[in-house]
Every structure is written in structure tokens, then in C-alpha cells.
Image (cartoon, grey):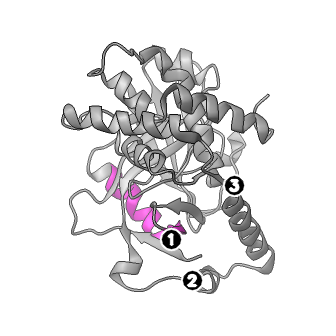
Amino acid sequence: MKIVELILDEEQMLSGVQAISIVEHPAIESDFITLSKEQEVKLAEVDSEKRILMGPALIPNKTIFRSNGEEEYYIYFSKDTVRKASELFLTKGNQNKSTLEHNFELEGLSVVESWIVESEKDKSQAYGLSVPEGTWMVSMKVYNDDVWNSYVKTGKVKGFSIEGYFADKVNMSKQVTLDDIISEVEQDEELLCAIREELQRTELESYSDYGSGVRNNAKRGIELNEKVNNKCATQVGKVRAQQLANGEKITLATIKRMYSYLSRAEEYYDEGDSKACGTISYLLWGGKAGKRWAEGKLKELGELE
């Protein structure tokens, strides 16, 4: 399985990180990047009175599983790309752009601090966050009462996850192999073994036995969204619907996100209102059949009691 380096295409206006999402199970899918269960690090509650959260936005040289429907592969970001992405995020004034689970735009959240970890003595260590040098860290202030009380305090969200557009270095220069990465970042044999084990684990944890009910709901969601000019759902939700409609395999991380989203968003689903975005988005993720399947699969795998 190939490993591809993603980089910033500075000639493209949309290149870079557009927003930071707060999520329960960060994951990565499609050409719209959302990171990642593989690099999940718990958020640190810096100050409960000031409502400030701290966590990594991007971790360099971390291999992350991806599937575009035609092939499965892995991506990573170099230290240089991580640094440039952090700078571009601020230059474009995206500090106040945030979403919930990459599905709903949020107001009242703002990145108030952004930095690159330069050494082991980084201040993130004081909050129990152990990340490698070159990691892009952010502190986010939560002004939104509902987000703080319903999602942060309850532990429903556990990490940051970026949203943005990056270029595929394969198409701009060369394909990167696992040996190229190891040579470039001078990783030792122990880390190499860990990477290989992670690749094997992720390859095994993919499933497509969700049945026709889930596929039909996704197809129905796509049809309804087209009737309202595709205004509902984020790019991630639209890609997810295509995967489900086509009966493609989805990873364990995706199943967790699927169950989490469908459990929370069920209150916005109205079977009698086919034009409502809450209804359409719910169907795009597989609807009630999707929730039942995801719940059953997670229980089967021992991921849910």
C-alpha cells in the first residue's frame, strides 16, 4: 500500500487549513482532510473558568489511513508542511472558524493561541500532552455555552481535527514509499515496527456488511440533497454518503464517527420534512438503519457495551 506526502499548494487559494473541528472520534477520509483517530491525543482543559482547551492540530510524519473509493493508501505531513499550514491558518484569519464533528458550523469558538512544539520542554507537557517536536498546537476558547456544557464538560468531544485542502505530492513530484519516509525522518527500527503494525491493524478493520437499508438511505439523502442544490452537509458527509451508497468498506474509526453522529443528530431528523438539512444529513450518514448497524458492529467488536 502506497504512502503519500500531502503538501501545501501555495498557488491555490483554498490550500491550507480552513477550520478546526471539535470531535469525539477524529477520522480521515476523502480529499477533504479531517485528522485523525490514528493521531488522537486527548484535549487538555487548560482553564475551566476561562473555558480554554489545548490540543494538537497537526502531528508531523504521522501515517494516516485514507480511502477514496477506488484505492486505499496512507498520507502524512512533513514538519515543514505542518509549520506552513499553521502560519497560513492565521494569515487567512481562520481563527474563528470551527465545526462540530465536521458536520455543523459553530459560533463562539476561537483559536487564541497557536504554536509549534520546538523541544521536549514545551508547555503542553505541563498539561499531560506528549507530542513530538514539530507538532502544531492550538489553544481554543469556548464562548458558546451550549458547546461547553453539552459537549466539552460531558466529554463528548475529545480532540481537535483539521479541515482543509492539501495537494498530493505524488501528482506534483514523486510517490513516496515507506522507505523514503524512514530515510527522510531517520526513524529507528522500533518506530518502523510500530508503523507496520498500525498499517496492518487499519487494513483489517474495514467493513462493508451494512446492508441495503443503509445504502438506500444514503442514496435517498444524495437525491434529496441534489433537489436543494447540495446545500446540506459538509464535504465529509457527502463523501460518506457516496461510500455507503456504493457499498464500500469503511474503517472502524469511521464506524465510531458514524454511530456518534447518528446518535446525536437523530433529534434533527424529521421523516416528514424531506427538505430539512437535518433530515438530509442524517440520511447521508445511513439514517436509522446506519445507526443500528454501527451500534451492532461496535458491540460485536467489543468497542461498545
| Residue 113 visible to an observer of this rendering | yes
Residue 85, image quadrant = bottom left
Q: Within 10 Å of the Cα at label 2, are there few (<14), some (14-19), or many (20+) other Cα atoms?
A: some
Q: Earlier in the sequence, mark 1 or mark 3?
A: 1
Quarter holding the N terminus is bottom right
The residue that disc 1 covers is 78
Side of 34 where 24 appears, left or right = right
Instruction: Give, as a three-letter code, the residue at label 1.
Output: Ser
Choose between 184 and 262: the one closer to the eye.
Answer: 262
The magenta segment: 71-89
Identify the residue under disc 2.
Answer: 177
Screen quadrant of the C terminus: top right
**Residue 112 location (% of width, % of height):** 42, 37
Secondary structure, mark 1, is loop
Residue lying farthest front? Answer: 212
Mark in the foreground, 2 or 3: 3
Q: Earlier in the sequence, mark 1 or mark 2?
A: 1
Badge 3 density bin: few <14, some 14–19, many ≥20, Cα 10 Å: few
Point out which mark residue 92 bears: none
